[in-house]
Image (cartoon, grey):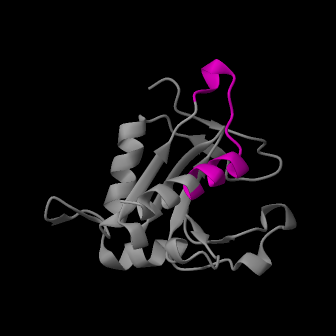
Amino acid sequence: INAQRYGGDKSKSMHPAYHIYISTRDMARLGYLMLRKGEWDGKQIISKKWHKEMLTKWTPRKKMNPAEQGEFAYGYMWWLYDTKVPELKGAYTARGAMGQYITVIPQLDMVIAHKTDRVYGRKTSYASYRRLIEKIIAAKQYQ
């Protein structure tokens, strides 16, 4: 609990980051909740309206800061894949510091939770993570 804290430079933004420390299993649970459109065990935990709102393209890829351009648009706290890769149509991901990712791929009925522990001095770049996604998609096609 002591690890939860605000961070960042308040002179640059009045909205500092709030780093959340959760297990990989809980990351996967959050992804699964999103994959199931906010429903868990027959109960609607997140309203369908809010689920749709979070995954609406509020910032199109072409309006991103140039450093963030690539294959993403942005919703509310979710990066939305904006790519021609068929399996990633409708997919989205949460990206955290040091290489924390929760990726939801509805086309494959799949959630990928990836965690990096900064204690070990490791970081996973998005490029490395993207290669992992490609390998998972390729492996899924051979099932």
Instruction: Give the residue furthest to the top.
Output: 120
Question: Residue 67: horizontal and vertical position, in percent?
Answer: 84, 61
121 drawn magenta:
yes
Give, as a single range, the part of the protein colored magenta: 117-134
Question: Residue 27: horizontal and vertical position, in percent?
Answer: 42, 45
Figure quadrant of residue 119: top right
Left or right of 5: which side holds 104? left
Instruction: Give the residue furthest to the front.
Output: 142
Q: Residue at x 71, y 44 (%)?
A: 125
Left or right of 46: which side holds 53? right
Left or right of 122: which side holds 35? left
Magenta span: chief secondary structure: helix
Q: Which residue is drawn at 41% across and 56% down?
A: 111
Q: Nearer the viewer, residue 21 or 29?
A: 29
Q: Which residue is drawn at 42% across and 37% down?
A: 24
Query: Vertical placement of 139 versus 56: above or below?
Result: above
- Quadrant for the N terminus, please: top left
Instruction: Give the residue furthest to the left.
Output: 42
- Quadrant for the C terminus, please: bottom left
Q: Residue at x 68, y 46 (%)?
A: 128
Figure quadrant of residue 106: bottom left
Left or right of 40: which side holds 51? right
Q: Which of 19 and 55 is in front in this view?
A: 55
Query: Vertical placement of 135 versus 124: above or below?
Result: below
Query: Vertical placement of 24 versus 57: above or below?
Result: above
